Image (cartoon, rainbow, N blue to C red):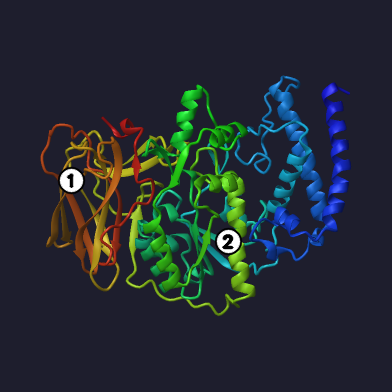
């Protein structure tokens, strides 16, 4: 047996001996402190006594401790070239490596630390809601993905997937509708909710929803109130849960009395000073976080919290608040493992935490408040909507003139921070940038509706895109409206940006119409690209800003859209 293997065996033996005493002590203890360790603050209703630990849970505990010890040993050996991994990724378990970095700088034989970690993992691995009614139908709006390793997305461990699988990856036990995505604010979803739900489920009986989760705190001012209002009108009895999840980037870094950026900017600044990467959440990161007297303060959440207050009071939603503190440092100390090292995305452990919080509300509604899916009412879509967006999926399902083509652009990810991806537009193409085109649009509703167009823009001036005249006509040639669109955004001040803009171009009655565009002038300085459309919406006349389905802006990869 190799020296390293002998070391592992000795470590495992000592760990098991310690474990037997430790578990024995826990099993017969009635300490609320132990219950908090196992179940976490706010989850005491899951167990009335620490003796609720089952043999299965003790087995899980044992496995977790051994795995944690082995991980620490292998990491130590790897860093000191004591073992040959032969290219194998030894940190391939997201539960044991929640940040996906393999960067836990823990002592090799720190049994107390490993025991604490194992206890926490046991709490995370236990699902107390498996006996809930499995017939409930869930709809997730604005949900992000869990990030497992080095910025790569993994849906398996996101909280929508955990709900689908009853808390653990495996057989699907609950029906979960994924509507929209984490890159879109609630504005587009609120305008096009009917279209999105019908795209997910064509049959009306499949559109009934019992539990609706909204994860839009960062973008609450961009349409959360009208979205909740429309959801409550459609699903008057549904359990609607709004997540108030702050991020480390919501914490301002203050220096010399002025805001220098966010907590992430402080981390980047320290990395430059140290001439090495200071990774968020590591022991080294906390060393500087605790000892450099960094001054921090929260962003102003007043407007967002006002909206949350109104939706709770007016529409009876349930609000989950991620634990915070008036002192931002204390909030980070309490919740640092909720976030990925990019300071923005929720970690695997964070998604697990949100899963438990959501299921707590569901448990409360079903078992204490008497929610019954068999008697839940479903109303109408109100004035309805008919939306078509091909920006993120490239599926163009509107009639168009023969000279139009689908363009695709592989871009970096200003808002996703990591993987590149593809976005799409409808245009005359780079070979014919001065040409015009037309599409057919239909208002299937009885009564006037706003016709909204989404199109690509740049900023600051001058725009790379041409100013165009828009004409909307009946099929018989009667002009309904004409307007001019200037594809220029001023929202980002002097930053070079490629963005999507939405504009109301007409109010149309029931029926089918043609929408034409033509360039005002040709050969204007800087206007080298064709006019590019990404979506068309036929919505209520109450809607004046249709939002964006997908990333609203890019600050990199600008050249991918053309010269």
Please identify, in this view, whether the residue under mark 1 or under mark 2 is nearer the observer.
Answer: 2
Residue 481 shown left or right of residue 214 in the figure: left
User: Mark 1 vs mark 2: which is more N-terminal?
Assistant: 2
Residue beneath the point at 35% across and 52% down: 389
Of residues 26 and 155, the one drawn nearer to the viewer in this rendering: 26
Local SS, label 1: loop
Of residues 380 and 67, the one drawn nearer to the viewer in this rendering: 67
Residue occupied by mark 2: 358
Q: Is residue 193 above or below residue 58?
A: below
Q: Is residue 296 above or below residue 559?
A: below
Q: Quadrant of the N terminus?
A: top right
Local SS, label 2: helix
Residue 195 visible somewhere in the drawing: no
Q: Residues within 10 Å of mark 2 (few under 14, many from 20)?
A: many
Q: Is residue 146 above or below residue 368?
A: above
Q: Position of residue 251 (x, y in %)?
A: 45, 45
Residue beneath the point at 80% across and 40% down: 66
Q: Residues within 10 Å of mark 1 (few under 14, many from 20)?
A: few
Q: Position of residue 437 (x, y in %)?
A: 20, 47
Mark 1 to mark 2: distance in Å?
44 Å
Give the label on residue 486, or none: 1
**Residue at far top of view:** 81
Residue 518 shown left or right of residue 24 in the figure: left
Residue beneath the point at 82% across and 58% down: 29
Q: Position of residue 78 (x, y in %)?
A: 71, 24
Give the label on residue 37, or none: none
Residue beneath the point at 17% across and 38% down: 434
Residue 275 visible somewhere in the drawing: yes
Q: Position of residue 132 (x, y in %)?
A: 66, 68
Q: Is residue 65 above or below residue 86?
A: below
């Amino acid at each position: 047996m190799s020296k390293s293997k002998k070391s592992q065996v000795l470590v495992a033996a000592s760990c098991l001996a310690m474990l037997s005493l430790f578990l024995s002590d826990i099993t017969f203890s009635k300490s609320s402190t132990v219950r908090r360790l196992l179940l976490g603050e706010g989850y005491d209703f899951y167990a009335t006594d620490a003796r609720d630990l089952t043999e299965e849970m003790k087995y899980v505990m044992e496995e977790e401790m051994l795995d944690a010890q082995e991980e620490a040993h292998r990491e130590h050996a790897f860093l000191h070239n004591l073992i040959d991994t032969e290219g194998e990724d030894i940190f391939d378990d997201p539960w044991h490596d929640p940040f996906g970095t393999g960067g836990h700088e823990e002592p090799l034989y720190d049994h107390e630390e490993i025991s604490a970690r194992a206890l926490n993992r046991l709490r995370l691995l236990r699902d107390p809601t498996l006996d809930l009614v499995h017939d409930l139908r869930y709809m997730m709006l604005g949900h992000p993905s869990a990030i497992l390793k080095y910025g790569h997305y993994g849906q398996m461990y996101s909280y929508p997937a955990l709900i689908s699988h009853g808390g653990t990856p495996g057989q699907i036990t609950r029906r979960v509708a994924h509507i929209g995505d984490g890159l879109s604010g609630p504005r587009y979803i609120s305008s096009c909710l009917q279209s999105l739900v019908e795209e997910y489920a064509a049959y009306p009986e499949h559109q009934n929803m019992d539990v609706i989760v909204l994860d839009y705190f960062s973008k609450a001012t961009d349409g959360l109130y009208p979205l909740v209002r429309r959801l409550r009108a459609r699903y008057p009895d549904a359990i609607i849960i709004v997540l108030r999840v702050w991020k480390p980037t919501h914490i301002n870094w203050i220096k010399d009395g002025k805001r220098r950026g966010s907590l992430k900017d402080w981390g980047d600044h320290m990395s430059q000073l140290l001439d090495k990467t200071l990774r968020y959440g590591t022991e080294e990161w906390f060393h500087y976080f605790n000892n450099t007297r960094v001054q921090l303060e929260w962003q102003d959440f007043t407007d967002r919290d006002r909206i949350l207050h109104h939706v709770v009071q007016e529409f009876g939603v349930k609000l989950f608040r991620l634990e915070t503190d008036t002192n931002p440092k204390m909030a980070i100390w309490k919740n640092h493992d909720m976030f990925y090292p990019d300071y923005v995305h929720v970690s695997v452990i964070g998604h697990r935490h949100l899963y438990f919080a959501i299921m707590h509300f569901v448990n409360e509604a079903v078992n204490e408040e008497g929610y019954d899916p068999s008697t839940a009412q479903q109303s109408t879509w109100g004035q309805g909507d008919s939306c078509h967006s091909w920006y993120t999926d490239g599926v163009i399902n509107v009639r168009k003139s023969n000279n139009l083509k689908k363009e695709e652009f592989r871009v970096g990810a200003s808002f996703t921070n990591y993987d590149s991806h593809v976005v799409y537009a409808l245009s005359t193409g780079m070979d014919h940038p001065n040409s015009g085109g037309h599409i057919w649009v239909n208002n299937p509703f009885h009564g006037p509706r706003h016709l909204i167009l989404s199109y690509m823009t740049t900023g600051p001036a001058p725009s790379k895109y041409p100013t165009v005249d828009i004409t909307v006509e009946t099929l018989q040639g009667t002009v309904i409206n004409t307007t001019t669109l200037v594809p220029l955004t001023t929202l980002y001040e002097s930053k070079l940006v490629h963005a999507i803009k939405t504009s109301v171009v007409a109010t149309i009655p029931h029926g089918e119409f043609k929408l034409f565009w033509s360039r005002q002038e040709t050969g204007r300085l800087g206007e080298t690209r064709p006019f590019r459309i990404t979506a068309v919406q036929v919505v209520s006349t109450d809607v004046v800003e249709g939002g964006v389905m997908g990333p609203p802006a890019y600050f990199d990869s600008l050249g991918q859209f053309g010269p």
